[in-house]
Amino acid sequence: MLVAVLAAMAVFAVSLFGWGRLTARLSGTQTSAVLDIAVGLAAVIFVGGVLNLVRLAYAPSLALVVLVGLAAAARDWRMLLAVDRTRLLVVAVPVIAILAFTIATQLPPSVYNDADDYPKYFFHPLRMLASGTLYGSALSAMGSETLGGKAFLDAFVAALFPLRWLNATDAVFGLGLCLALAGAMARNIWAAVLCVLIVAFIDPQYMNISPLYLGAALVMAAIALSRDEKGVASGLLYAALIALKPTFALFVVLHLAFLALLRWRFAAKAAGFAVLFVLPWIALHAPHYWVALMEPNALQAYGSGPPDNLNLFSMVQLTYGSTVIQFTLTMFAAFLAGLTVIWRAEDRFVAAAAAAGLAAYLVMFFVFGPRLSGYGEAVRYFTPMAIGVVTAVMAISARGWRTVLAAVPLAVFSLSLAPRINEALTYRFILAFPFAQSEDYRNLDALVMSDAMRDRIRKMQNMVPKGATLVAWVNAPFDLDLKRNPIIDMDSAGLATPWAAFPDSGYVLWEYRGVAMPMVQGPMESSIVVGEHERLIAGQEQKFTIELKRFAQEGALLYNDGRFALIRMPGTSG
């Protein structure tokens, strides 16, 4: 299986190279082979938006996407061999070592995130493959926390391999693309080695399979292409970032703003193309957004939350590893690296990227931190941008004495690297929350991913009439038969959207003693409800739990085994 997954990733990389070359020819952009792969990734994400919008994102369509890329790559295959062989030999050593370690410990990992991956991210690509689109549920985080770009990429893995291997998309392929970009973008061989190590050293605060290294790679590519006057490729990269995760829009907006100070025509053109290329993903979720505008839900938050005393120079160990001061020093080092080359006309775009990175860090921490999940979570959300900005800025600016600045991230994160390596070797995962190491957590993973759980869920689904709508608030919605019933997947983050609402009729499968609802079951005074958004999710969980109990009383409680309840909603014919 491992060999097959690695072979599939290699084929996918060549296909992306083909899409990148096709984009370069159409836009007149001058790129390298590695940058072509990144641009090709952005192009494929755009194609994914179109396929989802027209409801044709089935497995055969994905196969066609790969074949088109391979056909385009055949024309320029010699570019893949046109590399600096000396640099390749030197840089290949750390790259191969890092990837080999990651593959050995992460492909697949021993466990995944029980609150995010199981109830949300595992299900999204399966729903797309079954229905041809990611649009569907008004009770999921799709359309809010993500527009669907990552789920579309995950579907390439899910169409061929078991869900256990979904880590291949970001943790392996995304990481490999970051490492390749770091090695290719650097001005000299030793700067390339340093930047490859930067990618590995910066603590990823790994939480789930949402885009981390893929986002970092697209940030690096956007910085590398920012001195190109062609706005098409840059617009594709910006749009892909937003499609992967809306939080990346912070970097996009600030990077374009700083670039506008240097070349406003190019910035305006890139912004226009970014809007154009992200439109299919926006249009996909337009019905939900329309409801939010015309008939928004009254969102209910829980309490005021405990005080958050972190600051930019805090040395308090974060829940997800490392400290705030480590990220702060790293971002200021990148900013200084940008300032050292600002007087060189050809390098001013590096200064713009460094300034945008630092500004994004400060805005994420001070503005979005309290509004999302607290200052510590704000650092975690910023991590992909930190990896992308710092690596790209150091790669391009590190020459002579300035190479010392590239060593700052290595020195800053050297102390937190050893515990992460030890965790990966001991447990075969790098989940950043400590309780993931417990035996209970590993037992939970075994239960959720077991055949017995799938049989249990299918048995309850068979109690629902074929073709009837089924709302599923369970930890393993990926076990449901998507062809038997229309499935409305429900997750905690999805409840905190202004369009969240139950259908008028149907059935509900509710795992009320599972981990699909961590805030409802846990103490509300815990640190998990520090930020406004988390308190909003907690409040909405309480509200929808009351609604489900009402359904059980006014409709019909068809099944209850102490963990799962199957409810027929009021007004549904029995």
Image (spheres, helix red, strand yellow):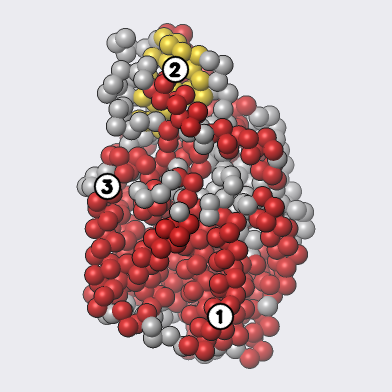
* Residue visible at 43% across and 71% down in the picture: 222
x, y percent for residue 124: 40, 42
Q: Is residue 63 left or right of residue 366?
A: left
Q: CA distance from mark 2 to mark 3?
A: 30 Å
As drawn, the label of residue 569 is: none
Q: Earlier in the sequence, mark 1 or mark 2?
A: 1
The reply to whether the C-beta atoms of the residues labelled 1 and 2 are less than 8 Å apart is no
Q: What residue is shown with label 2?
A: 566
x, y percent for residue 491: 48, 34
Q: What residue is shown with label 1?
A: 91
* Above or below: residue 428 compared with residue 44: above
Looking at the picture, tell me which residue is in the foreground, 389 or 499: 389
Q: Is residue 209 left or right of residue 13?
A: right
Residue type, mark 3 in image: Tyr
x, y percent for residue 50: 26, 53
Q: What residue is shown with label 3?
A: 58
* Residue visible at 77% across and 54% down in the picture: 316
x, y percent for residue 107: 53, 55
Q: Residues within 10 Å of mark 1 (few under 14, many from 20)?
A: many
* Above or below: residue 445 compared with residue 160: above
Looking at the picture, tell me which residue is in the foreground, 511 or 399: 511
Q: CA distance from mark 1 to mark 2?
A: 56 Å
Residue 247 in sight here? no
